[in-house]
Image (cartoon, rainbow, N blue to C red):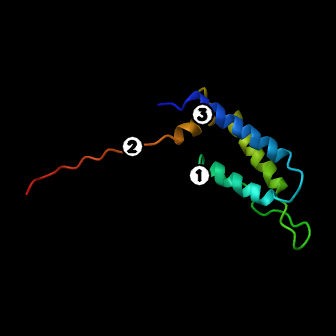
Amino acid sequence: MTPDRNVIMSMKNEILKDIAKCENYSESTGSEEYFYQLISKYSVLDPEFKKNLSFTGKVTVPGIEFDYRSELKSVAAKLRMWLLLDDDNYSQVEKLGKQTEPVIFISHRSFKPM
């Protein structure tokens, strides 16, 4: 069973919105919170999403929250690669959508009456 085309398009649109927001994030305020929201969001689709991403942030002024704008740009680059990768005519988003489908395991046990 393949994911519904509308779901795939919705996922692509969501990714494109997140890419644009990451690339255009202009202030350091709130950048750390948004960064961690994106990590949580995309780790649902890809448990290794945070792999190879920096989690350090930059200190601007002591007492002020860390600046994660460069980390947001890295997230945008990773998301953009998801959209660009193509394997066997299936986009990365379609493959990720397939991973989110429920899986049913059926177990068979032999029953021996006493």
How many residues crowd mark 3 within 10 Å: few (<14), some (14–19), many (20+)?
A: few
Q: Kindly check if marks 3 and 2 are in contact, taking CB atoms under 8 A apart as contact.
A: no
Q: Nearer the viewer, residue 75 or 14?
A: 14
Q: Kindly check if marks 3 and 1 are in contact, taking CB atoms under 8 A apart as contact.
A: no
User: CA separation, marks 2 and 1?
Assistant: 20 Å
Tell me the amino acid under the disc marked 3: Val
User: CA separation, marks 3 and 1?
Assistant: 20 Å
Q: What residue sits 84% from the left and 54% below the top?
A: 69
Of badges 3 and 2, nearer the viewer stands 3
- Residue 62: quadrant of the picture: bottom right
Q: Position of residue 104 (x, y in %)?
A: 39, 43
Q: Secondary structure at mark 1?
A: loop
Tell me the amino acid under the disc marked 2: Ile
Q: What residue sits 84% from the left and 66% below the top?
A: 65
How many residues crowd mark 2 within 10 Å: few (<14), some (14–19), many (20+)?
A: few
Instruction: From the image, tell me which residue sits under label 1.
Output: 47
Q: Position of residue 100 (x, y in %)?
A: 53, 42
Q: Nearer the viewer, residue 94 or 64?
A: 64
Q: Position of residue 81 (x, y in %)?
A: 72, 39
How many residues crowd mark 1 within 10 Å: few (<14), some (14–19), many (20+)?
A: few
Tell me the amino acid under the disc marked 1: Pro
**In this picture, residue 64 sits left or right of residue 8:** right
Instruction: From the image, tell me which residue sits under label 2.
Output: 104
**Badge 3 or badge 2: first in the primary sequence:** 3
Q: What residue sits 68% from the left and 54% below the top?
A: 39
Res. 69 mark: none
Instruction: From the image, tell me which residue sits under label 3.
Output: 7
